[in-house]
């Protein structure tokens, strides 16, 4: 059994609270031509190291109909920094150009097969998965980055081209599953490629 959502799969639905006080479902983003759902958190150095590059990518493709949706599925019992209250503080501080959703039950992370933070999923107009994996090849220190896989995938998608590299391994901290050791991963959650 493969843990992570496969290329061509439909985007799993969700209904989650956001840091802006609203609740969002997948259908709330129907107006977006393309959708990037990514699993992230507050504390991971791979997230904090690459958030500004993710911001630049989100802003670069905004006018091409690409909307970004961030989801934090990490257990606050494992890392208090990942609590909803700290999510709200982080958004107030950084004002990222995406909604930031809280997946407290971790059901959405399981539905998508999120492996790490950050882990990106790019969906086309029909909400079929066309890219999954890392944002960049060195998210912890983007000054050493040599490739932005997310940018490459969005450039091809918005130009109507097939994605040259649809699957990469996400690079980052593993999702913090509630009741499990900090570095636990589901046994079937091996590398993607």
Image: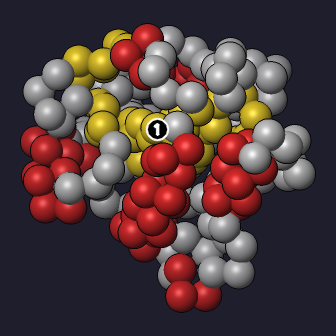
**Is residue 60 shown to the viewer in this render?**
yes
Residue depicted at 71% across the width and 81% down the height: 146
Along the horizontal axis of the image, is 180 left or right of 79?
right
Image point (85%, 43%), residue name: 161
Q: Secondary structure at mark 1?
A: strand
Q: Is residue 12 above or below residue 76?
A: above
Image location (x, y in percent) of residue 20: 14, 34
Most foreground residue, 4 or 154:
154
In this rendered view, identify the residue nearer to me: 28 or 108.
Answer: 28
Q: Identify which residue is drawn at 76% across, 34% down.
A: 130
Q: Position of residue 46 (x, y in %)?
A: 48, 66
| Quadrant hosting residue 93 | bottom left
Q: Quadrant of the N terminus?
A: top right
Q: Quadrant of residue 101?
A: top left
Q: Which residue is mark 1?
A: 67
| Residue 185 image point, x, y percent | 59, 40
């Amino acid at each position: 059994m493969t843990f992570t959502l496969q290329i061509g799969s439909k985007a799993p639905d969700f209904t989650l609270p956001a840091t802006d006080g609203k609740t969002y479902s997948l259908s709330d983003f129907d107006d977006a031509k393309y959708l990037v759902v990514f699993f992230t958190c507050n504390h991971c150095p791979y997230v904090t190291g690459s958030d500004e590059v993710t911001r630049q990518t989100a802003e670069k493709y905004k006018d091409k109909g690409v909307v970004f949706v961030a989801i934090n599925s990490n257990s606050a019992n494992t890392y208090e920094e990942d609590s909803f209250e700290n999510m709200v503080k982080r958004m107030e501080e950084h004002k990222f150009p995406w909604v930031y959703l809280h997946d407290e039950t971790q059901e959405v992370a399981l539905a998508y097969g999120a492996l790490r933070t950050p882990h990106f999923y790019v969906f086309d107009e029909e909400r079929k998965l066309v890219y999954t994996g890392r944002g960049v090849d060195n998210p912890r220190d983007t000054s050493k980055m040599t490739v932005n896989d997310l940018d490459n995938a969005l450039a091809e998608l918005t130009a109507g081209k097939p994605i040259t590299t649809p699957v990469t391994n996400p690079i980052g901290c593993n999702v913090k599953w509630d009741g499990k050791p900090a570095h636990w991963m589901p046994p079937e959650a091996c590398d993607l490629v």
